[in-house]
Image (spheres, rainbow, N blue to C red):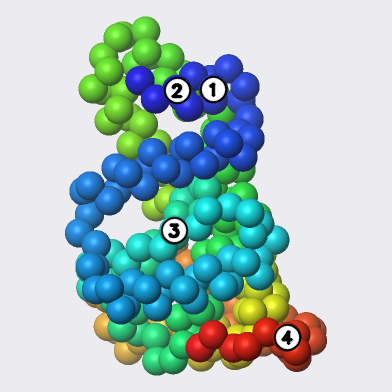
Amino acid sequence: MPCFLFLLLAAGCVDEAQEREIGEAIAGDINQQIPLVQDPLLNAYVERLGSVLAQASDRPGLDYHFFIIDSDVVNAFALPGGYIYLTRGLLEQTRSGPELAAVLAHEIGHVAARHGVQKLERQLRTGSVVGMLYNVILGGQPDLLRQRALGLGGALWSARHSREDEHEADELAVEYLVRAGVDPAGMVSLLQTLLQEEADQDTSRVSEWFSTHPVTSQRISQAKEEIRSVDATPPEDRKSVV
Ligand code: ZN
């Protein structure tokens, strides 16, 4: 039985060590069950770009990991602890390094702001997760517990974030992109591409993205506003990574 579940039950809040443990456990399950792109050059590029952005984030101390899911679906998500996933479908939608960087920076923003962890903490406080886990633990069915734990992980990463969390992740993404010396305009152009694709009724590829990251013209305007409000001059000592 994973010990982090006991810690969660006991404390009702999640510290950084527990967050890492939760992320690692869920990532282990996901990586066993979902096909990942194994392309050394592409993986190295995403890893390097993501690492530079993570170092420019508000939580540079986490050990970040970046994975590409081998799927046509367009989506990206972040697990607690710094495990970031994007799909091949989303990668193919990006037309430039800054657009890809914008996706990674947005997901790093969710991790830095602890959005997934806060969601879990809220569930713990309301007792819904606690009740579920108690039932399973008292029932003494370890396999079922593992299954439910994965379900818990699934809820964390597949559930849609609130509009406020999405907005905050966008704001943080702009900051991190600028700090890393990447043109934040990539975020606007990617969002415009996705919005256009949805308007063209080609929803089979982008529908997943829209269910977790709703793109609206308001969100694009807010991103533009954020870019205008930050000093877009990258630090002199930092070379662009894209
Ligand atoms: Zn998001």
Q: Disc 4 residue type?
A: Asp
Whole-number angstrom distance, CA of label 2 to CA of label 4:
44 Å
Q: Which of the two discs, 1 and 3, sits closer to the camera?
A: 3
Tag in front: 2 or 4: 4
Give the CA separation, mark 1 to mark 3: 24 Å
The local secondary structure at tag 3 comes to strand
Q: Nearer the viewer, residue 1 or 38?
A: 38
Q: Do callouts 1 and 2 mark residues in contact (Cβ within 8 Å)?
A: yes
Determine which residue is flagged by label 3: 65
Q: Give the camera-side residue of 6 and 156.
A: 6
Q: Quadrant of residue 149?
A: top left
Mark 2 close to ligand 1, CB under 8 Å: no
Which residue is label 4 attached to?
237
Within 10 angstroms of label 1, few (less than 14), some, or many (20 or more) residues? some
Q: Residue at x 57, y 43 (%)?
A: 117
- Spot occupied by residue 25 in the image (x, y as percentages of width and height): 38, 38
Look at label 2 and name its amino acid: Cys
Q: Which residue is mark 2?
A: 3
Q: Quadrant of residue 196?
A: bottom left
